[in-house]
Image (cartoon, helix red, strand yellow):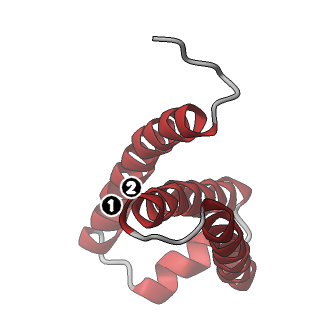
Amino acid sequence: MNVRLSDTGFTLFILQRLSGALLALLLFTHLVTIIFAVQGGLSVAEIVDRVRGNLFWISFYGVFALTAVVHAMIGLRKILVEWTPVNRRVIDVFVLLYVIGALWLGYEAIEAIW
């Protein structure tokens, strides 16, 4: 088997596995934090107030959003390539535009909390 690191399919395969592992860790951290906060009696407004202006949590959720976008878009691209007759270049452009839109929404959400 001759696999080149420049092969887009192989690179995306590895990147999706890495983003999936990181996403699982980030999701676990998020859920545990929220569960403890809610059980501790904090409301959503109080949780947002604690996150607002906190560089650690803003960075955490920024990485979380970026990782989710990367993971989802690689999966979307793979599904479209395998299940539709559409040209791969067209799919790549569509997914790239979708990535830009998703990143913009993530940025707006984080900026709203910051």
Q: Secondary structure at mark 2?
A: helix
Mark identifier at residue 27: 2
Q: Residue 103, which numbered label?
A: none
Q: Is residue 26 left or right of residue 103?
A: left
**What residue do we see at 45% from left, 67% from top?**
80
Residue 64 occupies which quadrant of the picture? bottom right
Left or right relative to 2: residue 20:
left
Q: Which mark is residue 31?
A: 1
Q: Amino acid at mark 2?
A: Leu
- Quick one: label 1, few (<14), some, or many (20+) residues within 10 Å? few
- Determine the residue positioned at 60% across, 68% down: 91
- Asked whether disc 1 touches disc 2, contact meaning CB atoms under 8 Å apart, the reply is yes
**Residue at left 43%, top 37%?**
17
Residue 12 locus on image (x, y percent)? 56, 41
Q: Measure how far apart labels 1 and 2 are at the Cα level.
A: 6 Å
Whether 85 is drawn above or below 31: the answer is below
Residue 34 occupies quadrant: bottom left
**Figure check: 9 above or below 106:** above
* Residue at 54% from the left image edge and 62% from the top image edge: 73
Q: Quadrant of the C terminus?
A: bottom right
SS under mark 1: helix
Report x, y in % for residue 82: 39, 58
Residue 108 position within the rendered picture, expressed as x and y whole percent measured from the top left: 72, 83
Q: Locate residue 4, reporting x and y percent.
A: 63, 19
Name the front one of labels 1 and 2: 2
Disc 1 residue type (three-letter): Leu
